Amino acid sequence: MTAHRPVLPAWTCGGCGSDWPCPTRRRELVAEYDRASVSLALYLAAQLVDATRDLAQVPAGSLHQRFLGWIR
């Protein structure tokens, strides 16, 4: 179980205080979703939808980059 879970409604990391998903959680997610990149993208897209409600003041492009832009 990871300590790097989102703290809502700020969407900061409970483990390190960075914006979630933090670099550590990103690495964990890549390992967790090994060979399932579409599932990872769907999971993060769902998180993005939830985050847009709480982070309405953050530009949509910034949120997209934060949640999905790092996936390869």
Image: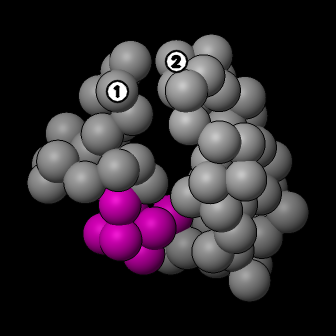
Q: Name the disc covering residue 10, or none.
A: 1
Left or right: where 42 falls relative to 43: right
Taking the image as drawn, is residue 3 in sight? no
Where is the C terminus found, in terms of image quarters? bottom right
Q: Residue at x 35, y 60 (%)?
A: 22
Residue under label 2, please give it.
54
Magenta residues span 22-29
Determine whether the residue tagged by mark 1 lies in a helix, strand or loop: loop
Can you give x and y, in whole percent of width and height, for residue 39 in the image?
79, 55
What is the CA distance from the residue labelled 1 to the residue labelled 2? Answer: 7 Å
Q: Quadrant of residue 24?
A: bottom left
> In terms of sequence position, does the residue under pointer 1 or pointer 2 come before the other?
1
x and y percentages locating residue 9 in the rendered image: 38, 18
Residue positioned 30% across, 39% down in the render: 12
Q: SS for tag 2?
A: helix
Instruction: Specify whether residue 25 is painted magenta.
Output: yes
